Each structure stands twice: as structure tokens, then as C-alpha cells.
Amino acid sequence: MVRHGRALADAGHLDVDHRARLLQVEGVLAYHEQDYERSVALNREALALYRSRPDPDPIDEVWARNNIGNALQQLERGAEALAEHDRALELASAVFGATHPNVALLTSGRAGDLLRAGRVEEGLEEYRKALAIREQALGRAHMDVGASHNNVAVVLVELRRFDEAEGHYRSAFEIYEANEQGEGPLAGDVLYNLGYVSYRRGWFHEAERAFRRAVAVREALYGPEHPAVTDTLNALAVALEESGAFAPAEEIHHRVLATRTAREGERSPSVGQTLYNLGLNHLKRGDWDGARPWLERALALADALPVADLGAESRIELGRALARGERPTGRAEALVLDGRARWLALGNADEVAYADRVLRGEVGSPAP
């Protein structure tokens, strides 16, 4: 597709500067349309034009290179993306100074490259640098500072440093509230993340409170049938189950199932996962007969779609239900062995170890 801007850029009467800017705009539009190869090509063409001028402006090169790096990042061409972002950051630091907000933005881009390359600690350090720059340049209550707190927290969760992550998420939420965004989409995301961190720390009542607040914010923003709402309801149900509130959790699972079925039809991965969750709800309270039909349906759907991980976990839990908390034999054993083999093929050592415990009869009835 040839856009109006591309046609104008090719027109002979435009000077180099205007042609470069039109190409750069086209590159940004291509990026937002997820046409990343085209975005790279257009921004590189713009960069070449910028640099061809007798007196090139380094600021133009900063943003062209940043755009190229962002698109390369999406294409999983990490080394090239990092090189472009590094050059953009070097130029920006010289032009704007090391404590300018634009330098923080580019530092965050570099952090993303490092994270995609598996260099998590280095990525975390870059996000911390961006946070420090923004706090100094913009003040601690600025929305961009909240975004940096959130970035730091996300990496800390990946590193399982939940205590530190919670502090950054709470700082982000306080900033959003101070800027009258306490009921906005960013606040909803942070509340969900706070619930997740509390859940991982075993603080299930705190997780429940955070998830309930996230549900309220997201329902007000998007309506009760939005995927963000059903995802949060699912997390709330799991937290309730960990607190022993199985009946309220089951009601929520049924609501999620009805919403997902109406939105996506009966044959979708998320519907299958909800069927599985209903089976788990019954398993957790030792209701073997109540669990079986849900897990049978989840397994049938997982195989029909197919969904590999859902098929593996449904086999193991259906085997548990059939064995009624005892060491599995017959069909129950065959299901668990099949599920174990599937997890082994998927490379999930934790789930393989769990299947081994089930086969030994070590995952029985829940405590009364």
C-alpha cells in the first residue's frame, strides 16, 4: 500500500528535510500497524536523508534510530535493536544532558532490548536508571515516574523478588491516585499486579482485596464482559480458593465460563481453561465426583483444539479425580502417565515432578 505521505515524500518539489519527516511519520504508522519490516525500512530511509544534509541535526538522528530500534525489537533482532538504541542514547545524552526525560525514555528502550536478550539484571539496572532520571527531572509524583516504578516492578517479579516489587507497584499506584488516575486503566493494571504479588507471597486475603478493586476499576472502564475483567475474576477466584472460600470461587468460575462462552463460543482455549478451573475447584475440596465432568470436558476440548498444556494438566488432574486421592491405577494411571509425557515433551520439569508425586499417591485428599 502506498500512502499519501509516501507519495508526497517521493515528489520532486520537496526538500530533503520534509521528505525525511514524511518518511519517518510513515514509519511510525507502519509500526503501529505491526508492519515492523516496513517501519525499519522507512525510518532507515529517513535517517539516511537526515544525515545527508550539510548540517544534520542530531535530534533527528536520535528519534529515527530509536524508531528503528523499537521495530527491530519487535522483530526479535535483539543485537541490532540494542545497537540502534545505544547510538540513540549516546546522541541524546550529548544533546539533552544525562538527566533529561528523553534520556530516561531511551534508557527504558535499552532495558527492553536487554530483557529480550535474557540479560535480566542488566535490564533491571537500566529501568532503575530511567526511574532515577525521571524522579530528578520531573518530580516524584509525575505519571512517567509511575510508569518507571511499574517497569522496575515487572522485572523484580520475574526475578521473584516480590517484596521489592510490591513497593514499586504501591509507589506507582500512589502516583496514579495523586494524578486523579486512581480509577484509570493504569491503576487497574497495578491493582491486578499487586494482587498477583500478594498471591505469590501467600497473602491470599490481601490478594483477594487487590483483585476485587481491580475488578471494580476494570468493570467501570470496559464493562463486565471485557477479557480484562474475566481474567481478573479468574485470579480472584483462585485467591478465594487458597483461602478456603470454595463456593464463592465456584460462582465466579461459572460467571467467567458464561461470559467467555458467549464471547468466544464453546470451542476456545479460555473456555477450556475455565472448565479445568471448575474441576480444580472441586478437587481442592475433595469432591472427586464433582470434579470429573468438568475435567473430562476440559480434556476433550484441549484435544480437539488442540491446546498442549491444557491437555497435559487436564489428564493429570482427571487421573487424580478418578483415583479419589489414592495412588492411581488403571485409566487413572494411564492418564497421569500420558500427562507426564506431554509435560516432559514441553520441557516443564516442575509439572513432571508434580506428576511423579501424583503417581506415587503423594497428592491425595485436601486437609479437612
Image (cartoon, helix red, strand yellow):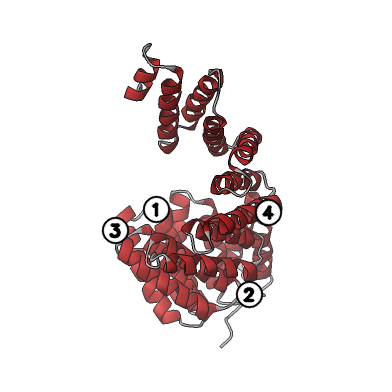
The answer to which of 253 and 98 lies nearer the viewer is: 98
Which circle marks residue 363 in the picture? 2
Which circle marks residue 262 in the picture? 3
**Mark 4 and mark 2 in contact (Cβ < 8 Å)?**
no
Among the two numbered marks 2 and 1 on one chain, the one whose residue lies closer to the N terminus: 1
Judged from the image, the secondary structure of the residue bearing numbered disc 3 is helix
**Mark 4 and mark 1 in contact (Cβ < 8 Å)?**
no
Point out residue 158 in the picture as x, y percentages from the top left corner: 63, 59
The residue carrying mark 4 is 125
Residue located farthest toward the top when viewing the structure as drawn: 12
Point out residue 32 in the picture as x, y percentages from the top left corner: 42, 38
- Residue 108 vs 219, above or below: the answer is above
Q: CA distance from mark 3 to mark 2?
A: 35 Å
Judged from the image, the secondary structure of the residue bearing numbered disc 1 is loop
Which circle marks residue 268 in the picture? 1
Say few, some or many: other residues with alpha carbon within 10 Å of mark 4 (under 14 / 14 to 19 / 20 or more).
Answer: some
Q: Nearer the viewer, mark 3 or mark 2?
A: 3
